[in-house]
Image (cartoon, rainbow, N blue to C red):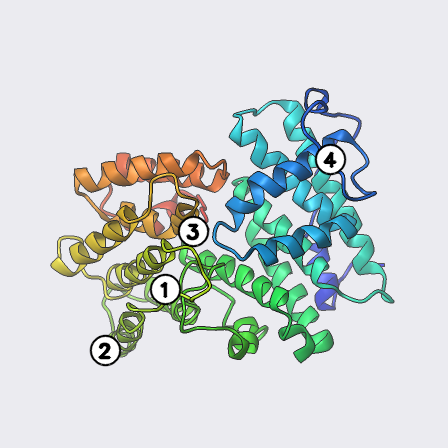
Amino acid sequence: MVTQNPTTPLQIAVTRLSPVPLELHQSLDNLQSQPALCLSPFLSSKESQFFMHVFSIETAPRLFPTASPLFLQRLITGALETPHLLYAILASACSHHSRLIKDGGADSKLACLKFTNLSISSLRSALSDRNAALTAETVTTAMALCTNDVCNGNMQTWRTHLGGVMRLFAAFLDSRGQLRIDDPYVQCLVKWFTTMDVIAGLSGLSESGVLSSENGLLDRTCTQLDGDSIDDICGYSLKLAPLLARLSQLVQHQHQNPPEISSTMIAESRVLELEILSLNDCSMPEDLHHPELQSTHLAFVHSALLHLHRRVQLIPKCDAIVKTDLSNIIKAVRNIAPFSFANILILWPIFSAGSETDDIAEREFIHNRMCDMQTHGLGNFARARQLLNKFWDANTPMPWDGYFANLGMELVLF
């Protein structure tokens, strides 16, 4: 059983996955006539069959818009054999479907909470069994629940859950070492976690944990991953991920120190700037059929430069360097079709540009593109657009991260 004072990574991780109050007898009767996908004995109701169908054709392609079909097939196959993962993706599909059809009613919310609670309960049971092996599906469940927090706009719990996922993932990799790391599916999970963790560190004034000595998840798998090409999970070269984590650390350091930038910070930031610029011309994998990934990668590269120039080097908005960063981000975004699923990958770049530009035409383009992105039914897009509009309306000289921190507001740009 999980103790009251958890000490192991697994115990710490599971105690962070807190259930929510719920009346389990509620159901969505109006959905029972919808198409069903029944491939597992755990899909015992028409409701669960319907949401499995939704996940496979609607939710999964939006959560992982350019990922390999093999990754999605493995995820779904694992869910059909693993109750806690199945319930986690049913919760994801349920909440996503309610946003797609603009149904914010009580029945829809209760169905989502039901599946979430069932997933957490089943996950706790699996983790409390000391004789059971820690599986990739267990890690996937924890990551799916954390991702659901983000997509639902639940800012109060997602960072806590992300910390639990990190510890669980580290314990999983420790359990069988190289055999784990050599698994392509596990490598995709590492990239999924890396995307969440790195962007978490750049979504405000909190640090990323992906490079910390406590876990070293990216470091432990980087030799097996192709960093020279643009990645289909992250939407950018994996060589950029540690640079983004270092950027996050410099941002935190600059925020916690006097407004003047030190000579040491200047030197570090210039080295980082050159490393980021060196990734401007990353190649596309030959077997990847998503040409828009070239543009998503460039959007991330130029957003990293924008954050470095504005939040670390403290270059003013009116400077030509900043204006060039903004122009390059918007150029990259324009090369992505307005309703392409590839837009799902670039919430951080487009919000970054929006928070730094005062140009009316650029703001209008960003506003319209974020409205297009919101139609994909992911709640973090709606929240990001609302907060960006709030920041614009405030017309404050404060930087966006400090402005939201002062208001006690959190956002995540993943």
Name the residue rendered at 55%, 42% in the picture: 154
Q: Residue at x 26, y 59 (%)?
A: 306
Residue 313 against residue 222 in the figure, above or below:
above
Residue lying at 50% horizontally and 60% vertically, measured from the top left: 197
Q: For mark 4, what is the residue?
A: 48
Q: Tag 2's secondary structure?
A: helix
Q: Secondary structure at mark 3?
A: helix
Q: Which is more N-terminal, label 2 or label 1?
A: 1
Q: Which callout, 2 or 4, points to the residue nearer the camera?
A: 4
Can you tell which mark lies on residue 345? 3
Q: For this rendering, which residue is in front, 90 or 306?
A: 90
Residue at mark 2 to residue at mark 3: CA–CA distance: 35 Å
Quick check: can you spot residue 387?
Answer: yes
Q: Which residue is mark 1?
A: 256
Q: Is residue 44 left or right of residue 242?
A: right
In the figure, 351 relative to 162: above or below? above
Mark 4 or 3, nearer chain start? 4
Alpha carbon of mark 4 to alpha carbon of mark 3: how far?
Answer: 28 Å
Q: Which residue is mark 2?
A: 263
Identity, as a three-letter code, of the amino acid under mark 1: Gln
Q: Amino acid at mark 3?
A: Leu
Out of 144 and 292, give the one closest to the viewer: 292
Give the alpha-carbon distance from disc 4 to disc 1, as whole Å. 48 Å
Mark 3 surroundings: few (<14), some (14-19) or many (≥20) residues within 10 A: many
Q: Name the N-terminal-most of marks 2 and 3.
A: 2
